[in-house]
Image (tube, coloured by chain):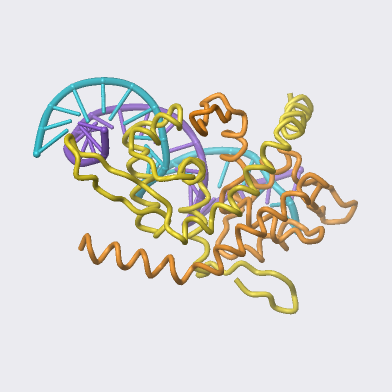
Chain colours: A yellow, B orange, C cyan, D purple
Amino acid sequence: MTTPETGIVYRSDCPSRPILDQIADKWSMMVMAVLDEPRRFNDVKRRLEGVTQRVLTQTLRRLERNGMIVRRVLPTSPIGVEYSLTPLGESLREPFGRLYAWTVENVDEIQARQQDYDRRAQ
Amino acid sequence: MTTPETGIVYRSDCPSRPILDQIADKWSMMVMAVLDEPRRFNDVKRRLEGVTQRVLTQTLRRLERNGMIVRRVLPTSPIGVEYSLTPLGESLREPFGRLYAWTVENVDEIQARQQDYDRRAQ
DNA sequence: CAGTATCCTGGGGGATACTG
DNA sequence: CAGTATCCCCCAGGATACTG
């Protein structure tokens, strides 16, 4: 991304593009929100109603790969795994929180606009 | 979404879920960022290097449906179309800006973490 | 200029079953 | 408990061609 005198241009090779793609998705945001403290796999799963094991695992792996969370195997029997935010992940919670708060605040108006639009287009 | 005494739980019927799905995607964020002032279709397209007409049109329609932008047909020849943010869309730029700024600030560290992870997993 | 109209492909994500 | 392993389906999104 650059800002030439002609205005903002988003270049296709800007590394923020794939990052945004990996980070700004529904499940990642919810996982991050849920990890306000270290939690175990099934604990996270229970808090994200409707997520499947497979999708949750993928999401956790991706977040781990991007340095947002740490996976720690607990020496228990049966095995336990605990996920927690890294400082990097912690620093993302603030912008995520803003976006989520905005969504909650404006959900009603958005749904109203959607209905207007759909009514016009029939 | 609720916050019971046991902690945060994201219910599957929370209306913010589909909203986030529609709003927090790569192209929507870039379109919103580019619309710092009213711009015409091809102007937006030129600033989003790599986007196809089809995808841009879809993104613009969705943003319009959600009340984020307004589409205005200009009485020119040949026809011109101008897109601009609504107050609602304007209010979303701040949280988006935060998220984008975070991405830019942390892109290097994220890529480093990715390489670490990939090296470990080979 | 600002779009539709087709066609096509990858992969996100749900369902289900199995396991160290 | 915390995962893999399959199977499958849908559709976001790219490529390309055409148009009022």
Taking depth in this image into account, of A49 and B47 the one nearest to the observer is A49
* As drawn, B117 above or below A74: below
Q: Where residue A11 sits: x, y (%)?
A: 57, 69
Asked where in the image residue A64 lies, by quadrant, the reply is bottom left
Q: Position of residue B75 (x, y in %)?
A: 90, 51
Q: Looking at the picture, how far across and down is residue B80, in whole percent?
A: 81, 54
Q: Which residue does the image show at 39% across and 53% down from the upper left?
A: A69
Q: Position of residue B27 (x, y in %)?
A: 59, 53
Q: How many marks?
A: 0
* Residue at the farthest bottom position: A5
Res. B1 image quadrant: top right
Q: In which quarter of the image is residue C15?
A: top left
- Taking depth in this image into account, of C10 and B19 the one nearest to the observer is B19
Q: In this view, does D14 lie to the left or right of B92?
A: left
Up the image or down, A16 lies above or below A74; here it is below
Q: In this view, does B14 lie to the left or right of B94?
A: left
Q: Quick one: quadrant of the C terminus of chain A?
A: top right
Residue B17 vertical position relative to residue B50 in the rendered view, above or below: above
In the rendered structure, the answer to whether residue A92 lies left or right of residue B79 reads left
Q: Image quadrant for the N terminus of chain A?
A: bottom right
Q: Residue at x 48, y 60 (%)?
A: A19
Identify the residue at horizontal 45%, vertical 31% (top origin): A47
> Which residue is rendered at x = 55% and y = 27% of the image?
B4
